[in-house]
Each structure stands twice: as structure tokens, then as C-alpha cells.
């Protein structure tokens, strides 16, 4: 059983404070560090910050740290619950102690830190790699595994960069690779080609990167980004293997019922939902796009539902769903999307995230696992993706430590499965139905 749970304040990839949790049991000490979003949706669980202007501009998380050290930790230890078999009970206990619907009293950051560390402790107690422990917890196969297609965000815009591009993420997905490791290679080669293309067109000063490690050249229109990607994919020689995903994160530029593509400049560029719809259809017809996330705002249900009719691509709900079962059920009723973006800190416990994935799979949706723009070197989501048989994940560019740590862990897992002689296949073009492979 658990003998100690302590938290401390550490930094995330944007240099902002976040929470680190250390949990000790008979099997060792297990650490987790919690990520943080920039384009957060209103339906996410609450990340507790102190709001004291004299400390980290109000961003310190000392209250959340205290909630782990003084409230949650002691209560969990006292309960005698064991991570090996009772992770969901530990999570439930924390939800009950917090007592709010959105974890706003004790903080989803405090609660998630414990939940992730407890999952690691549970895996160790059972002598399992974390991905296998998660496979048991979520009821997927442990006889064989699917390694995911990585979606690399190589062009950053929106709230993640200083350029005038309203759309937040342009991702490359090596669906035509033969293994996860080969997918990483194709993406890294394309990333390097993209840097050359940007340098040739906009000069060397334009090759700086945004929050998720992607480039942020001085472009503002989606077609400029997609033309750059096409050029890079072609010059790297991967046209037949790499496809494109886009996350406009359109809630970030939704203003008074309209979408302002000029929201980062002085010039408004207002489009209503039907103009947005036409733009997306035009982009889908001209570029090899296979995934579109949050094309509309978090409450623009009708647009999602309309777009989802005869939708040829994966239509992912991020801010729309916030990894929240109630929101997923609403979206099912309205047929608003066909995939869920799964972010642990949107809901705040590992077991609730597994529940959300289960609900999505039951509706025949796909599950797309995600990092946050403010990340840490914690690689939990790599194991989560494999354990859930989710078939794809996004963790930013093939660049920057907090991004590549997830991709590197996935290459470790691929090697590990090979060494253990456990059958495994790369999801490839079947990334949307990996849970049925
Ligand atoms: P965030 O962005 O982590 O800044 O919310 C990620 C996303 O929108 O998918
Ligand atoms: Zn998103």
C-alpha cells in the first residue's frame, strides 16, 4: 500500500509552474508531472492556480501542492487503497473529497498528479509495463498490441505562436510507414525539409518555433501552411506515406457568433459558420487531409452536426467534449463528431479518461490521445495510447524534449514488444479503427 504522497512546484515547457507528485509504495517511488493547456475549453476540469500577482504572475500552484500534501495524500494513505487493483477507487475517493463537478476545490492538477503516479505504482506492483497495466484497466487485449500513428504538429499558429496564423495546428501523419519508428523517421525528414522550405521562402529568421515545436513562419492563411507542408512532404520523398491533420482550435477565434481569422492582427477577418464550412470543404478537396479537430467552437453544435453528415475525414472533438462523459453523450445524441481528443488533464483522473475512451469506442468513434501545449517530460500518454489501443496520438513536433520524450517512449515500447515476443502492428491507415484491429 501507499506510504507517502508529496507534491512540489516545478516548471512546464513554457516556463510556468506546474505540479509534480511523488508517490511511494513498497515497490518504489513513482513520479508524475502535470501538463497545462493554452487554448483551454470552458468545459475542462479546473486547473488550480494561486492568482497571487507577486508570484509567477499569478501562476504559482502552491495551493494545489498543499492540497496534495495536506488533504488528498493523507486521506488516500489512510484509506489503505492499493494502486495495483484499486486505481479507480483511489480516483473516486479524490473526486468525492473534492466534491465539485469540475474539481475546482482541490484542483484537477493536484488530483491528476496523484492519479498518474498511482497508475505507475499499480503497474510496478503487478510487475507490468505501464501500457500493459493500462490495457488491463481499460479491458483491451494484452495478447497483442497496436502501435499508434503519430500526428506531428509541425506548423504552429493560434495561441501557440507569435505569427498571424489563426489556425493552431498543422500536423503530418506518417500513415504509410511500416512501423512507429519508421513513421518518426519520415516525419523528422519532412520536418527538416519544411525548415529548408521556410528558410528559402521567408529567410532564416522565420525558422523559429512555437510552443509545440512546430515552425511559426509569417503566414496567416491556411492554404499557405498547407502549400508549405505539401512542398516539404514532396521534397522529403514521402508524398505517398504522409497525410495531413488540422486543428484550427476555432474556439480561440470565435467572437460573437463568428470566426475571426484575423484575431491576432489589427484587421478582423470575420467568417460565419457556413463560410467556415465552405472553406473546410475546399481545403479537404485540395489537400491530403485525413483529420480535422475543433473546426467549430465548443458550443457550435449545429455546425459540428452538419459537417459530420457524410464526413470523409476523422472529425475530432476537443474543446467540444473536454474528455467529459456528459459532453460525449450530448455529442453522440447530436451526431456531432466521430472522434474524441483524449486529454487526461481535461477531466483530471486516469480512470475517468479511460471511461471516456470506452464510451467513445462504444459509439464507434475513434480515440485520439493528446498532450497539452504546456508540457513536461512526463511520458505517460505514450503508454496510455498503446494500452488503450487508440491507434493515434499527437505530441507536437519531432523536436523539443517535452515533445520527443513521448515519441521516444513509444519507440521503446515498440522495441519492448518485439523483445518480449508479443505480436504488435502499426496502426497505419487503420488508425481510426485500431481498437478493432
Ligand atoms: P492546448 O492545445 O493544450 O493549448 O489546449 C492543444 C489542442 O487544442 O489540441
Ligand atoms: Zn485541439
Image (cartoon, rainbow, N blue to C red):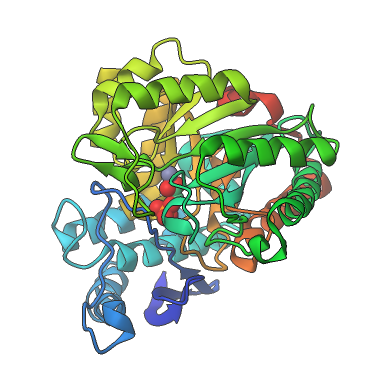
Name of the residue lying farthest toward the left: 99
Asked if residue 55 lies left or right of residue 32, the reply is: left
Q: In this view, does 113 lie above or below 272?
A: below
Q: In this view, does 65 lie above or below 125?
A: below
Name of the residue lying farthest toward the bottom: 54
The answer to whether residue 47 is visible is yes
- Residue at 61% over, 21% down: 286
Name of the residue lying farthest toward the front: 267
From the top left corner, tell me how far across and down residue 115 is, in percent. Answer: 39, 61
Q: Is residue 369 above or below residue 60?
A: above
Asked if residue 348 lies left or right of residue 214, the reply is: left
- Residue at 75% over, 38% down: 231
Foreground pick, 85 / 349: 349
- Residue at 24% over, 46% down: 43
From the top left corner, tell me how far across and down residue 124 is, in percent. Answer: 57, 62
The answer to whether residue 148 is visible is no
From the top left corner, tell me how far across and down residue 52 is, in percent. Answer: 21, 83
Asked if residue 113 lies left or right of residue 101, the reply is: right
Q: Is residue 124 above or below residue 330?
A: below
Foreground pick, 81 / 228: 228
- Residue at 38% over, 46% down: 262
| Quadrant holding the N terminus | bottom left
Q: How many marks?
A: 0
| Quadrant holding the C terminus | top right
Asked if residue 18 lies left or right of residue 380, the reply is: left
Foreground pick, 103 / 174: 174
From the top left corner, tell me how far across and down residue 235 is, in percent. Answer: 83, 40
Amino acid at each position: 500500500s501507499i506510504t507517502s504522497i508529496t507534491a512540489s512546484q516545478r516548471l512546464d515547457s513554457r516556463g510556468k509552474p506546474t505540479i509534480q507528485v511523488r508517490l511511494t509504495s513498497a515497490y518504489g517511488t513513482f513520479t508524475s508531472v502535470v501538463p497545462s493547456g493554452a487554448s483551454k475549453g470552458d468545459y475542462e476540469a479546473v486547473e488550480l492556480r494561486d492568482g497571487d500577482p507577486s508570484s509567477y504572475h499569478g501562476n504559482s500552484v502552491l495551493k494545489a501542492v498543499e492540497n496534495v500534501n495536506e488533504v488528498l495524500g493523507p486521506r488516500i494513505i489512510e484509506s489503505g487503497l492499493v494502486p495495483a487493483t484499486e486505481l479507480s477507487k483511489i480516483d473516486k475517493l479524490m473526486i468525492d473529497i473534492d466534491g465539485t463537478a469540475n474539481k475546482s476545490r482541490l484542483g484537477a492538477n493536484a488530483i491528476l498528479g496523484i492519479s498518474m503516479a498511482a497508475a505507475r505504482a499499480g503497474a510496478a506492483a503487478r510487475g507490468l509495463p505501464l501500457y500493459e497495466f493500462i490495457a488491463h484497466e481499460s479491458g483491451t487485449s494484452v495478447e497483442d498490441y497496436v502501435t499508434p500513428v503519430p500526428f506531428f504538429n509541425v506548423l504552429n499558429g493560434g495561441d501557440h505562436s507569435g505569427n498571424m496564423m489563426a489556425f493552431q495546428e498543422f500536423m503530418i501523419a506518417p500513415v504509410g510507414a511500416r512501423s512507429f519508428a519508421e513513421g518518426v523517421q519520415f516525419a523528422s525528414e519532412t520536418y527538416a525539409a519544411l525548415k529548408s522550405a521556410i528558410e528559402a521562402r521567408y529567410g532564416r529568421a522565420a525558422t523559429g518555433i512555437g510552443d509545440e515545436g512546430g515552425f511559426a513562419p509569417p503566414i496567416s492563411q491556411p492554404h499557405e501552411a498547407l502549400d508549405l507542408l505539401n512542398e516539404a512532404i514532396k521534397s522529403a520523398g514521402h508524398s505517398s506515406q504522409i497525410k495531413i491533420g488540422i486543428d484550427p482550435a476555432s474556439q480561440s477565434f470565435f467572437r460573437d457568433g463568428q470566426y475571426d481569422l484575423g484575431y491576432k492582427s489589427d484587421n478582423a477577418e470575420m467568417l460565419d459558420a457556413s463560410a467556415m464550412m465552405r472553406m473546410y470543404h475546399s481545403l479537404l478537396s485540395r489537400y491530403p487531409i485525413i483529420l480535422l479537430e475543433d473546426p467549430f467552437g465548443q458550443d457550435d453544435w449545429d455546425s459540428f452536426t452538419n459537417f459530420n453528415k457524410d464526413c470523409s475525414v476523422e472529425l475530432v472533438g476537443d474543446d467540444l467534449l473536454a474528455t467529459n462523459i456528459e459532453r460525449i453523450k450530448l455529442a453522440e445524441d447530436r451526431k456531432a463528431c466521430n472522434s474524441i481528443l483524449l486529454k487526461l488533464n481535461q477531466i483530471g483522473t486516469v480512470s475517468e479518461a479511460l471511461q471516456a475512451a470506452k464510451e467513445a469506442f462504444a459509439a464507434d468513434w475513434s480515440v485520439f490521445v493528446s498532450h497539452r501545449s504546456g508540457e513536461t517530460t512526463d511520458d505517460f500518454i505514450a503508454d496510455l495510447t498503446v494500452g488503450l489501443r487508440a491507434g493515434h496520438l499527437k505530441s507536437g513536433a519531432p523536436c523539443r524534449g517535452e515533445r520527443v520524450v513521448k515519441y521516444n517512449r513509444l519507440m521503446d515500447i515498440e522495441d519492448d514488444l518485439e523483445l518480449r515476443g508479443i505480436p504488435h502492428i502499426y496502426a497505419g491507415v487503420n488508425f481510426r479503427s485500431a481498437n478493432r484491429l
